[in-house]
Image: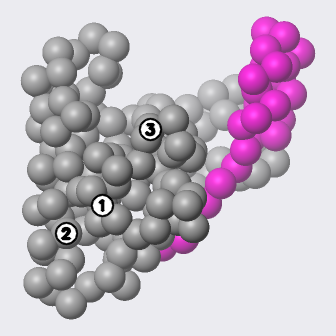
């Protein structure tokens, strides 16, 4: 996009998380990290892109990367849209292991406001966890609701 004069700042890494509900049932969001082994979680890593970047642009970028860098992982990149909707979100401060505490607060808010979870849990990583001490990590936790 830069070559087309449409440069943009790459957004923060995001992730969607889910698990096999038939196998593990429906624990609350706060209980899930404690009851479902991380090895059983499914996930999707996401990077938000501007509206002017389309599916064809992503496919062209994949081809360019595969030709230039010979990186087979580029094959797994895909254009993915998250449908618009309502979310309950909270800024979690601290290590990932403490997220159940924040998720419990979010669940109370969801319940007290007559809402229901409606989709995959999502996280936006504001800190680079490779460089930031765990106690200083900042992560936006999001639960889609209806």
Where is residue 74? Give x, y as percent: 76, 26
Quarter of the view holding residue 66: top right
Q: Which mark is residue 38?
A: 3
Q: Residue at x 24, y 57 (%)?
A: 30
Instruction: Identify the mark nearer the N-term, 1 or 3.
Output: 1
Kindly report the distance in space between the C-alpha atoms of the residues bearing marks 1 and 3: 14 Å
Instruction: Identify the mark nearer the N-term, 2 or 1.
Output: 1
Residue that mark 1 sits on = 29
Residue 76 drawn above or below residue 113: above
* 31 relative position to 39: left or right: left
- Rendered image coloring scheme: one colour
Quarter of the view holding residue 142: bottom left
Q: Residue at x 22, y 34 (%)?
A: 97
* 72 relative position to 117: left or right: right
Where is residue 40? Give x, y as percent: 53, 43
Kindly report the distance in space between the C-alpha atoms of the residues bearing marks 2 and 1: 7 Å
The foreground one among 55 and 116 is 116
Q: Residue at x 43, y 76 (%)?
A: 118
User: Are discs 2 and 1 less than 8 Å apart at CB?
Assistant: yes
The foreground one among 35 and 41 is 35
Instruction: Identify the mark nearer the N-term, 2 or 3.
Output: 3
* 34 relative position to 16: left or right: left
Whether residue 82 is visible, yes or no, is no
User: Are discs 2 and 3 less than 8 Å apart at CB?
Assistant: no
Q: Residue at x 18, y 81 (%)?
A: 111
Whether residue 4 is visible, yes or no, is yes
Q: Magenta part of the protein: which range?
A: 58-84
Residue that mark 2 sits on = 107
């Amino acid at each position: 996009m830069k070559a087309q004069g449409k440069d943009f700042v790459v957004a923060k890494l995001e992730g969607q998380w889910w698990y096999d509900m038939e196998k593990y049932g429906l624990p609350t969001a706060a209980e899930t990290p404690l009851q479902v082994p991380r090895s059983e979680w499914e996930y999707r890593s996401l990077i938000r892109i501007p509206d002017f970047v389309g599916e064809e642009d992503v496919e062209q970028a994949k081809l360019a990367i595969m030709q230039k860098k010979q990186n087979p992982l580029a094959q797994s990149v895909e254009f993915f849209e998250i449908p618009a909707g309502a979310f309950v979100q909270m800024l979690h401060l601290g290590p990932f292991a403490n997220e159940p505490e924040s998720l419990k607060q979010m669940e109370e808010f969801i319940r007290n406001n007559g809402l229901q979870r409606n989709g995959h849990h999502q996280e936006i990583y504001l800190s680079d966890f490779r460089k930031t001490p765990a106690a200083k990590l900042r992560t936006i936790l999001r639960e889609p609701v209806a």
